[in-house]
């Protein structure tokens, strides 16, 4: 067995005894760092959150919060991790006994009772505290004087306080005893990090480069290939290799379903899978870029994706999850596929023999099945340009955020001179695979953009797919939500005179 080496709270630690399926959480707790806890083991509660130094452009890094219960410890070989125990001394306070500003605010504002969830909240808050884009005008006067801070809705999924703190940075953290108001107050009371703060200054240096890694134990292997060519060599002749980037899906399989793949291949740091290119005819997104990285890199260029991102799980998950992983699982309720179908996206499949591009609406062949051949991987997702003028992503779930969808609908409609020139509708949760709603698309395309056209298309949309009854929703409810999604889209994008008539 090869040992890994991870820098934790500023000290290099040898990962003796770490196996291919040893979780980061278990290894950290075995090292005596027991602040991170296991709550759900599925990435929903955030009790296990830690900070990781991730690349952030040329010569910089970014403290990123991730769930420690999902990824294997071997995936952090050569990387830097900070736990709640390491924040105090590292946060510019000088002594291990001192509190980090985030910890201090949580303490004085009553943000903790039993304390089980507190270390996870603290790590997620610290990632937002150090976020370079956060506007920090100084002390939050309202919070300091004890007056209620209501926050402000800046954009979908971004509720920001007077100090620029995005409250949805905590969307993946759950508390069952304190109540969220004092936690919010603590977040909104944070000022800017001190200039001498070591964790702040650390972001001015690049993250450690990925380390080729190989760990073996009990007949299983974890391998981080050093190149795409090496990855293809490992894939040759095997059909049971598990590719992981953020491990947000594979980690659940390990924890809940006790999956133990004989070969795990980490692809998250392969540069060929981490591209983001915006050209005149298309946007290409590397399959191993995290959704948070894609969101920052696109910077609002794709409005439909801006609606998707806040509804895709939580910030903790988006900091690790990828388009490649979400599409590669083939889940019929994955959130990204309906949005990408509406955008007319395609996937670039790569193997040792070369590359081929497949439209996403031709990619899936059955439940969790696709046209991907043995030895092929998803290298990138391509979105054609220009985009439709009107677009939306509607997710119907029991919770507004951090939930699995009952139905998901992506809609993109282009209108010229009152006529629909193109329409694409992607659906999730109503068939064995994500699908396009070809019937309603045909009704819309070439027709006047008016209420009668939309009513006809919405009625047809209710009949799309083969929805089923399950514990999330009934088939009848799913069909009704499809119809309502297009009617809501019309209410949002109708010409003003038609909207007045419809009232």
Image (spheres, rainbow, N blue to C red):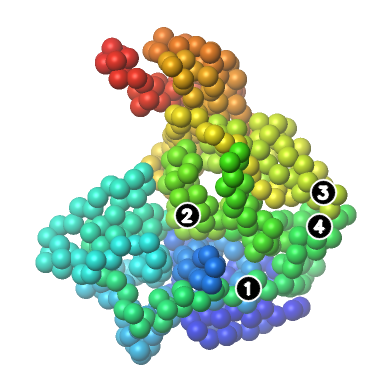
Mark 1 nearby-residue class (10 Å; few <14, some 14–19, many ≥20): few
Between residue 484 and residue 501, name the one nearer to us.
Answer: 501
Q: Helix, strand, or loop for circle 3?
A: strand
- Whole-angstrom CA distance, mark 2 to mark 4, is 30 Å
Residue 144 position in % (x across, y down) = 15, 68
* Residue at x 49%, y 25% (from the top left corner): 413
Identify the image quadrant of residue 19: bottom right
Q: Helix, strand, or loop for circle 4?
A: helix
Mark 3 nearby-residue class (10 Å; few <14, some 14–19, many ≥20): few
Between residue 88 and residue 107, name the one nearer to us.
Answer: 88
Identify the image quadrant of residue 396: top left
Query: Relative to residue 184, is residue 356 depicted above or below?
Result: above
Q: Which mark is residue 232?
A: 4
Query: Relative to residue 494, is residue 14 depicted above or below?
Result: below
Left or right, residue 201 beside residue 435: left
Identify the image quadrant of residue 107: bottom left
Mark 2 nearby-residue class (10 Å; few <14, some 14–19, many ≥20): few
Report the residue marked by disc 1: 209
Q: Sequence order check: which comes first, mark 3 or mark 1?
A: 1
Q: Sequence order check: which comes first, mark 2 or mark 4?
A: 4
Tags 2 and 3 touching, CB below 8 Å: no
Dot in front, 4 or 3: 3
């Amino acid at each position: 067995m090869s040992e890994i080496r991870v820098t934790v709270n500023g000290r290099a630690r040898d990962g003796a005894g770490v196996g291919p399926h040893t979780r980061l959480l278990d290894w950290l707790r075995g090292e005596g760092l027991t602040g991170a806890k296991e709550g759900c083991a599925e990435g929903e509660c955030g009790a296990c959150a830690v900070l990781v130094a991730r690349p952030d452009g040329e010569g910089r890094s970014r403290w990123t919060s991730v769930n420690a219960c999902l990824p294997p410890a071997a995936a952090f070989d050569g990387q830097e991790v900070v736990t709640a125990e390491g924040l105090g001394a590292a946060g510019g306070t000088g002594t291990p006994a001192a509190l980090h500003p985030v910890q201090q605010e949580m303490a004085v504002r009553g943000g903790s009772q039993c304390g089980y969830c507190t270390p996870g909240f603290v790590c997620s808050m610290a990632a937002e505290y150090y976020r370079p884009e956060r506007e920090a005008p100084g002390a939050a006067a309202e919070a300091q004087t004890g007056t209620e801070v209501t926050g402000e809705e800046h954009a979908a999924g971004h509720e920001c306080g007077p100090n620029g703190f995005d409250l949805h940075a905590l969307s993946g953290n759950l508390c069952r005893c304190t109540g969220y108001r004092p936690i919010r107050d603590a977040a909104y009371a944070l000022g800017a990090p001190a200039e001498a703060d070591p964790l702040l200054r650390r972001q001015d240096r690049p993250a450690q480069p990925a380390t080729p890694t190989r760990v073996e134990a009990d007949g299983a292997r974890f391998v981080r290939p050093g190149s795409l060519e090496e990855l293809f060599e490992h894939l040759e002749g095997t059909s049971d290799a598990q590719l992981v980037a953020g491990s947000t899906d594979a980690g659940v399989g390990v924890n809940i379903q006790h999956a133990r793949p004989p070969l795990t291949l980490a692809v998250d740091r392969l540069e060929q899978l981490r591209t983001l290119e915006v050209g005149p005819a298309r946007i290409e997104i590397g399959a191993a870029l995290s959704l948070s990285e894609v969101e920052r890199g696109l910077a609002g260029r794709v409005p439909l994706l801006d609606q998707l991102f806040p509804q895709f799980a939580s910030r903790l998950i988006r900091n690790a999850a990828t388009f490649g992983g979400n599409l590669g699982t083939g889940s019929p309720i994955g959130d990204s596929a309906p949005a990408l179908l509406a955008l007319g996206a395609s996937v670039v499949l790569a193997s040792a023999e070369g590359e081929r591009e497949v439209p996403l609406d031709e990619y899936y062949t059955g439940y969790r099945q696709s046209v991907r051949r043995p030895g092929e991987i998803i290298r990138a997702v391509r979105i054609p340009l220009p985009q439709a003028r009107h677009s939306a992503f509607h997710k119907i779930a029991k919770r507004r955020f951090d939930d699995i969808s009952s139905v998901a609908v992506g809609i993109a409609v282009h209108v010229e001179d009152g006529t629909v020139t193109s329409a694409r509708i992607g659906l999730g949760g109503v068939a064995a695979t994500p699908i396009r709603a070809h019937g309603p698309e045909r009704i819309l395309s070439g027709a006047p953009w008016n209420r009668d056209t939309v009513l006809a298309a919405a009625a047809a949309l209710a009949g799309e797919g083969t929805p089923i009854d399950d514990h999330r929703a009934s088939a009848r409810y799913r069909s009704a939500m499809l119809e309502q999604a297009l009617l809501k889209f019309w209410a949002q994008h109708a010409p003003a005179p038609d909207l007045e008539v419809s009232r």
